[in-house]
């Protein structure tokens, strides 16, 4: 098997390094699986946290997903001394192989197939990343949200070597509209099947106002999964925002990070103390034409993740975009947004540097 083919993305905050990943997997064809790896400062090898995304209800949005969208969550693990990776499973983002996680008709759902297909992609990522000299292959965890959480639960059925713990946020499949799930009995049965052989310690977190998988259904998942002795720590989190399904996010960091920290410590996986600093760009000054609100947005731009760009017009109108696959994509998106409010715009900053004379 090929090792990970990585292209270096510029370091940010002179602390963290991000690499683009190409994970080989036969079923994904020559494209393989798209991903990102974030490394903390210092010398490895680092323990590995592999993060796995959800699946949008609208199929047209699957190709629009990008690994950069998981950078805020990745950073929280990197701040704690972990190498944090994320991959796009087959059929998402730029990963090859076509969508592999279909569960078939709503009234006769095959969730076992869907979960195991996602787990196969995670297994391929662990196999490739564990060969890197900067990864501690004996201390690896899986962290997933929604469909990624379900794939993480399926992974525990047949875990890769070195997997010592796993975390699922709002794990499940089949929610095609708010508070509706296709063939819920089949979904519960899939959790029961996965739990028959799962012995990796797991943390599950579901918010009280999750409109994909509500508290009563989540309890049924837990009971089914644990019936054969699968170890799971279950947390009923308080309501979060308009839909608690979005708890595992930058906005929910103050809620989910203590839960994960406490769980990992119980597994003997201590985090780095003190924590590494959050992300921040270099000392860029805001454009002179910006209003007070514009300066606040520019400060938010500095704290955001690459690739990113900030564009401004002569009258002070502006637009900015972050967490894009490339600097060129960020420039185009920022100019388009600025152009919707001003006749002529230019790019002022790209990533951590100036793009034009001040």
Image (cartoon, helix red, strand yellow):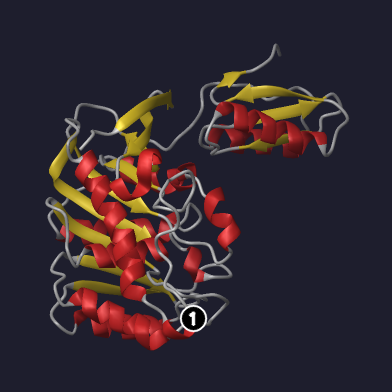
Residue 13 vertical position relative to residue 62 in the rendered view, above or below: above
Q: In which quarter of the image is residue 131?
A: top left
Where residue 210 appears, x then y in whole percent?
A: 48, 74
Q: Is residue 201 left or right of residue 203?
A: left
Q: Quadrant of residue 327?
A: top right
Q: In this view, does 344 lie to the left or right of 292?
A: right
Tell me what residue is drawn at x 48 percent, y 43 percent: 94
Residue 230 vertical position relative to residue 297 in the rendered view, above or below: below
Tell me what residue is drawn at x 38 percent, y 61 percent: 148
Q: In which quarter of the image is residue 5?
A: top left
Where residue 62 appears, x then y in whole percent?
A: 53, 55
Task: Classify the position of the C terminus by image quarter.
Answer: top right
Task: Classify the position of the N terminus by image quarter.
Answer: top left
* In the foreground, 220 or 97: 97
Question: Is residue 18 in view?
Answer: yes
Residue 316 vertical position relative to residue 183 in the rendered view, above or below: above
* In the foreground, 232 or 106: 106
Label 1: state its secondary structure. Answer: helix
Q: In this view, does 20 lie to the left or right of 314?
A: left
- Tell how many labels: 1
Where residue 74 appears, x then y in whole percent?
A: 38, 45
Residue 334 vertical position relative to residue 222 in the rendered view, above or below: above
Residue under label 1: 106
* In the foreground, 44 or 112: 112
Tell me what residue is drawn at x 49 percent, y 70 percent: 244
């Amino acid at each position: 098997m090929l090792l990970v083919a990585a292209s270096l993305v510029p370091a940010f905050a002179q602390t963290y390094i991000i690499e683009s990943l190409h994970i080989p997997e036969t079923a994904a064809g020559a494209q393989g699986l798209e991903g990102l790896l974030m490394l903390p400062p210092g010398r490895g090898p680092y323990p590995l946290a592999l993060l796995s995304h959800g699946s949008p209800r609208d199929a047209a949005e699957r190709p629009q997903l990008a690994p950069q969208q998981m950078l805020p969550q990745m950073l929280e693990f990197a701040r704690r001394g972990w190498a944090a990776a994320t991959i796009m499973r087959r059929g998402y983002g730029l990963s090859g192989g076509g969508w592999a996680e279909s569960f078939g008709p709503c009234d006769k759902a095959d969730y076992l197939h869907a979960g195991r297909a996602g787990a196969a992609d995670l297994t391929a990522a662990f196999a490739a990343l564990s060969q890197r000299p900067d990864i501690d292959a004996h201390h690896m965890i899986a962290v997933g949200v929604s469909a990624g959480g379900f794939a993480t639960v399926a992974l525990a059925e047949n875990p890769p070597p070195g997997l010592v713990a796993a975390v699922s946020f709002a794990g499940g499949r089949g929610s095609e509209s708010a508070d509706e799930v296709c063939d819920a009995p089949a979904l519960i049965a899939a959790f029961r099947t996965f739990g028959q052989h799962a012995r990796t310690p797991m943390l599950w977190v579901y918010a009280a106002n999750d409109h994909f998988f509500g508290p009563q259904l989540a309890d049924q998942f837990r009971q089914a999964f644990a019936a054969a002795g699968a170890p799971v720590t279950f947390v009923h989190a308080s309501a979060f925002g308009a839909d608690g399904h979005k708890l595992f996010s930058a906005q929910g960091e103050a809620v989910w990070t203590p839960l994960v920290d406490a769980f990992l410590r119980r597994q003997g996986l201590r985090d780095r103390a003190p924590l590494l600093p959050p992300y921040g760009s270099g000392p860029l000054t805001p454009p002179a034409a910006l209003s007070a609100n514009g300066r606040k947005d520019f400060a938010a731009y500095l704290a955001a993740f690459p690739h990113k760009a900030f564009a401004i017009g002569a009258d002070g109108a502006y637009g900015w975009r972050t967490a894009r696959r490339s600097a060129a994509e960020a420039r185009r998106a920022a100019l388009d947004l600025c152009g919707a409010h001003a006749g002529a715009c230019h790019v002022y900053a790209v990533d951590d540097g100036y793009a034009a004379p001040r």
